[in-house]
Image: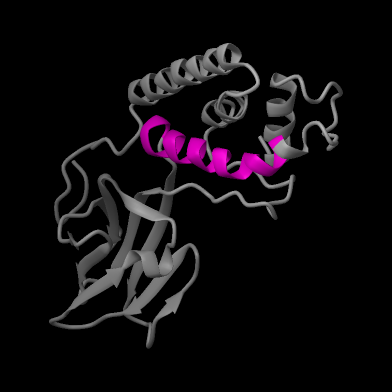
Amino acid sequence: MTWGEVKLVTLQTMFSNDGEVLVEDDVNREYLNAMPGKANEALQQLALVGHPLLKTWQVRIDADAESEAASTELLILPVKQDSLYKIALRHYLPRFRCLNGSEVMLDAGGIYGTAEDWRMEGDDVFVIPGELAGTYTLWYRAYPQTITAETPDSEDIDLAPEAAALIPLYIAGELYKEDDPALATLWRNEYEDGLVKVQTAYAASGAGIRAAGVRNTTGWW
């Protein structure tokens, strides 16, 4: 679902856009101006308590690296003997919220499994040994995107489809309170019911890392 589709469905819900194409006019302009703020409220709720927004990022300790190199997908660091790396994750990942159930994987020496020798300090500092060459994969929960007045209609909503589909109900319920409190309450109740269903479905999905064996120095049994 795109931001433009969210706006269109919201206006259609509030009887303020009859056609299949978004048309701004004097009747719905006030609604459209107020939508970004309400959309952000819904995004926060849906990502934090509904269906978590999961992303991955990698940290590679590379024996051949001479200096740090960072991108949106990967941080490469040189091997550093008898020392630790303390990595402020929000410096590289502005939308980082927390690790997803402490899910950190390590690929070292051809062995891939749940990482053991790491810890978190504070809210976002990832601490690992500097001498172990390998690639850490961090599964983390991210904060949602921020919608503004300048957000293009073509921008995708970065949520699971079943969660994104609830945003118009939340916005309509908030913006229609003065026009028709009964209808606004109805839409808000539909949103809350949908939020519970999204929570339940995610919990039942078994999403997350599930151990497939016991990791040792020689591989998987």
Q: Residue at x 34, y 77 (%)?
A: 77
Seen in the picture, residue 1 relative to 135 is either above or below; the reply is above
Rendered image quadrant of residue 213: top left
Q: Tell me, what colour scheme is on the image?
A: one colour
Q: Main secondary structure of the magenta part?
A: helix
Q: Residue at x 36, y 50 (%)?
A: 140
Q: How many numbered marks have been drawn onto this rendered protein structure?
A: 0
Residue 7, position as x, y percentages in the image: 70, 34
Q: Quadrant location of the N terminus?
A: top right
Considering every residue shown, the one lying at the far front of the view is: 178
**Relative horizontal placement of residue 178, taking residue 214 as reference (left or right):** right
Give 107 or 166, whichever is nearer the viewer.
166
Seen in the picture, residue 155 relative to 205 is either above or below; the reply is below
Seen in the picture, residue 199 relative to 93 is either above or below; the reply is above
Q: Which stretch appears magenta?
A: 31-51
Q: Residue at x 27, y 35 (%)?
A: 210
Residue 51, position as x, y percentages in the image: 42, 32
Give 208 or 4, whichever is nearer the viewer.
4
**Relative horizontal placement of residue 53, taking residue 101 as reference (left or right):** right
Considering every residue shown, the one lying at the far bottom of the view is: 66
Q: Indicate whether residue 50 is drawn in magenta.
A: yes
Residue 149, position as x, y percentages in the image: 68, 52
Q: Quadrant location of the C terminus?
A: top left
Q: Indicate whether residue 35 is drawn in magenta.
A: yes
**Relative horizontal placement of residue 116, taking residue 92 as reference (left or right):** left
Residue 104, position as x, y percentages in the image: 27, 52
**Relative horizontal placement of residue 25, taking residue 50 as reference (left or right):** right
Give 196 or 117, whichever is nearer the viewer.
196
Rendered image quadrant of residue 64: bottom left
